[in-house]
Amino acid sequence: MAEELGDDRPAKGVVDRTLLERARELCDHASPLVRVAAAIITARAGESAGHRVLEQVARGEIETTDGEDMAAAIELAGELGMESARPALERRAFGGALALRRDRFAWHARIALAKMGHERAIREIVGELRSWSRDRRTLAVAAAGRARITSARALIASMRGDADRADTDAVDEALAALDAGAPADADA
């Protein structure tokens, strides 16, 4: 509901104080759905009250019916650099020992890892920018933008205006994100 009332990505610390106080309380709520939503609100406000919940989502210890919130929580774990969640994010992104099972949040986990500077995640996202599939390229464009993979900027820019290569809105959004954010691959 907080997202419906205002910006879904408020500047750190810019959340209504009453809403933030209530979200802090709800990080321990009995309902996983409520805990995850509250953790997202507090994390986006720059607070750590829900970090434990975000890590539990990344590890698969908390599941909810709200896929959007699950995806947001997983990406936030990476954005916040939660090293303790790294092994779980790797399992989600790349599969288990035999990689037989594909996690439904693998794409989000790969973005989270790329935000943390994870070389394999960055390499795979950048590699998919050259995929034969337009849909895979479009997803890679979106992932590169969300993860702020600056090394992909030139390749993404080369797709601008060419709907056959990737969705043009996705390309424009990724380029705007790359121009606005700190790189995930400064040393890559």
Image: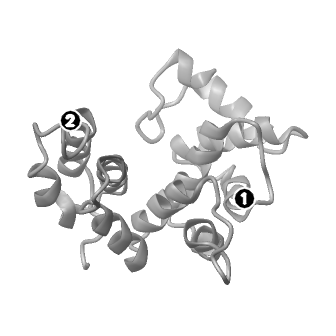
Q: Is residue 17 above or below residue 122?
A: above
Task: Name which residue lies at 72% across and 65% down.
Answer: 59
x, y (%) of residue 22? 73, 30
Q: How many tags in the picture?
A: 2
Q: Quadrant of the N terminus?
A: top right
Seen in the image, is 137 located left or right of residue 109?
Answer: left
x, y (%) of residue 80? 50, 59
C-alpha separation, residue under disc 1 versus residue under disc 2: 37 Å
Which type of secondary structure does the marked residue at label 1 adopt?
helix
Amino acid, disc 1:
Arg
- Along the line of sight, which residue is nearer the eye, 111 or 126? 126
Which type of secondary structure does the marked residue at label 2 adopt?
helix
**Counting residues from the N terminus, which is met first, the one under dot 1 or under dot 2?**
1
- Along the line of sight, which residue is nearer the eye, 158 or 109? 158
- Along the line of sight, which residue is nearer the eye, 140 or 73? 140
| Dot in front, 1 or 2 | 2
Judging by the rendered image, the residue that carries numbered circle 2 is 168
Seen in the image, is 156 located left or right of residue 13?
Answer: left
Task: Name which residue lies at 56% across and 59% down.
Answer: 106
x, y (%) of residue 65? 76, 37
Seen in the image, is 170 located left or right of residue 8?
Answer: left
Identify the image's colour scheme: rainbow, by chain, secondary structure or one colour.
Answer: one colour
x, y (%) of residue 24? 72, 40
Q: Residues within 10 Å of mark 1 (few under 14, many from 20)?
A: some
Q: Quadrant of the C terminus?
A: bottom left
Amino acid, disc 2:
Thr
Task: Name which residue lies at 58% across and 46% down.
Answer: 71
Task: Name which residue lies at 44% across and 42% down.
Answer: 12
Judging by the rendered image, the residue that carries numbered circle 1 is 52
